[in-house]
Image (spheres, rainbow, N blue to C red):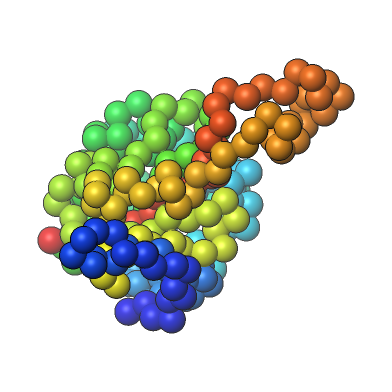
Amino acid sequence: MLENFETVGEWESDAEGNKVGLRRIDMESVMRHFTTFDGPVLHIGSKAADLDTTTRWRRVFAGKQVIGIDIEDGDNVDYVFDITKNISGLRKKTGIKQYSTIVAYHLLEHVTNPFEVAANIEKLLKPGGRLILSVPWVQAFHAYPDDFWRISFSGLRQLFKNLDFEFEFYADGHEGYAYQLTRNGIPEHSPRMCNLEARLFQLRFEMGDMPEQKILKKREDKKIQISKPFCQYMACSIVAVKR
């Protein structure tokens, strides 16, 4: 159980006095919580790359069996396997039918059919097993090898209908904190609550106040302003349990 959340703010939202709020907890505490999860662990998209050069998940699950798979060979990859394919091929390679924990960080945006991948993940997860997943909600295009989707909490619930969501949070660009929206002190990421995103996380810039665009540093007169509102990078992240 995660504790020690810090309240960032709380506001009355309607005539009945319901309060909406935002709270956060440092990601070090979240990672310590993950260390209590059982093995074996399957890390999908495990190749050490720009987004994860430190093989942190093997450190998080030190002493437990961790299997890393990726579509390309490289550091931190135990088996080359495409998670969009029939999972019988992975089971033959590893000798493991199901996993107690599956990690899928920065994965679903790069597959052409996230529903297909979600179904494979559910099949590979033991009953009572946990999925740790994060997908960008706001981020620039990044090709590994391509980039297709941005997925909300509502979208994740559609993808993983056979899992119960135990913990949901927004992650910032540095993954320093996990943020949760609350209603009357209880975490909630329903459509009515996620409608608050624009007022909580979005910034507005007038032309003269825009931050630096490095590629146009020498052409201040050519800054590109697509819109005044700007939302910083954030990811929708979950821990979900298979029924």
Q: Is residue 49 above or below residue 71?
A: below
Q: Quadrant of residue 98?
A: bottom left
Farthest right residue in view: 218
- Please state the horizontal and vertical placement of residue 19, each as a whole percent of the image: 29, 66
Q: Residue at x 60, y 55 (%)?
A: 174
Q: Could you tell me if residue 93 is visible in this image? A: yes
Q: Is residue 4 left or right of residue 220?
A: left
- Please state the horizontal and vertical placement of residue 199, each as a whole percent of the image: 43, 48
- Please state the horizontal and vertical placement of residue 171, each as a whole percent of the image: 47, 55
Q: Is residue 208 above or below residue 45?
A: above
Quadrant of the frame with the C terminus? bottom left
Q: Is residue 222 above or below residue 166?
A: above
Q: Is residue 142 above or below residue 195?
A: above
Q: Residue at x 36, y 64 (%)?
A: 11
Viewer-side residue, 225 vs 124: 225
Q: Residue at x 47, y 28 (%)?
A: 147
Q: Quadrant of residue 128?
A: bottom left
Q: Is residue 80 left or right of residue 219?
A: left
Q: Could you tell me if residue 98 is visible in this image? A: no
Q: How many marks?
A: 0
- Please state the horizontal and vertical placement of residue 207, each as a whole percent of the image: 68, 29
Q: Residue at x 24, y 66 (%)?
A: 18
Q: Is residue 188 left or right of residue 227?
A: left
